[in-house]
Image (tube, rainbow, N blue to C red):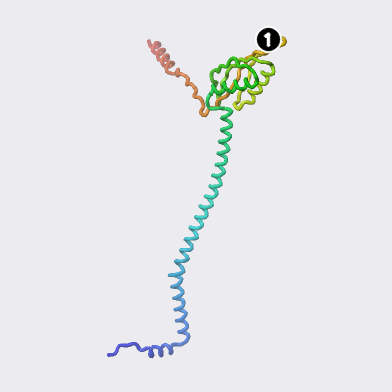
Amino acid sequence: MKIGFETKGLLRRIEKIPQIYKAIATLVLVAATVAALVYFVMMPQLEAKAKLDKEYSELQIQLNNLRELKKNMEKHRKEYAQMQELLQDILKQLPETKDIPNLLRNVTSVGEETRLKIKYFEPKDLKNKEFYSELPFEIKFSGPFHSVAYFFDGVRRMERIVNVENFTLEAKGTPKDVFLEGTCTANAYVYLREQPKTKEQPKTGVKDDKKADKGGQVGKK
């Protein structure tokens, strides 16, 4: 018994197949090949491309958000720096402490520059306001008229805000050598970071209740 594959016989049989069937078989084979290529090669690539496109879009959105955030951060940094500069300027005019020695030194320096003699300087108690405190102090001084005028102008131009009020002047000396003696009350200001705590009112409800209880007991008797 012979087992083999006769190619000549197979070719003869294929040659006997009508041309239309050969064309159909060729189309089917081509279609199957194309379908296999699409399914096994192109489809995974298209899916990978779609996935990459989606990830790219998401990353692009995140990148745009980060860019916008960076712009806002730079803007906020500039605003913060400007606010810090403004705060420093305010703190020069409204320090956070009473700083009485430095205040006395500055006022005395203005007096020396204007040739006005500061005879007395006494700070008073702080007066708390909404976001600042007033630091009143009393000054006694003596000197020529022009020195007094220059002194008040120098106090007005001090870096720290000082408001002069309630002043008195009295002329003394001889007609040839007249000088003024005076007093004034001035207010410096202190910046408060925190609001001052208000004192709590004592509760009277307990005492009233006790009185009411006693009254009730008396009525019962």
Image coords of residue 51 (percent x, y)? 47, 61
> In the drawing, does residue 9 fall left or right of residue 119?
left
Furthest residue to the left? 1
Residue 177: name its quadrant: top right
Residue 53: x %, y % from top left: 50, 60
Q: Is residue 65 left or right of residue 33?
A: right
Q: Residue furthest top?
A: 174
Q: Is residue 130 above or below residue 29?
A: above
Q: Which quarter of the picture shows residue 185?
A: top right
Q: Residue 207, position in %: x, y?
A: 43, 15
Count of numbered tags: 1
- From the image, which quarter does the C terminus lie in? top left
Q: Nearer the viewer, residue 221 or 159?
A: 159
Question: In the rendered image of this protein, does residue 162 appear above or below residue 119?
Answer: below
Identity of the residue drawn at 29% across and 90% down = 2
| Outermost residue toward the right in this view | 175
Which residue: 42% across, 14% down?
A: 211
The kind of secondary structure element at disc 1 is: strand
Q: Position of residue 34 (x, y in %)?
A: 46, 74
Q: Which residue is mark 1?
A: 173
Looking at the image, which is closer to me, 76 or 21?
76
Q: Name which residue type carries label 1.
A: Gly
Q: Is residue 194 above or below residue 186?
A: below
Quarter of the image where one finds residue 75: top right
Q: Is residue 196 left or right of residue 148?
A: left
Instruction: Give me the residue at 41% from left, 12% from top.
Output: 215
Binning the other alpha carbons within 10 Å of mark 1 as few (below 14), some (14 to 19) or many (20 upward) gives few
Classify 31 as above or below 177: below
**Looking at the figure, which quarter contains the N terminus?**
bottom left
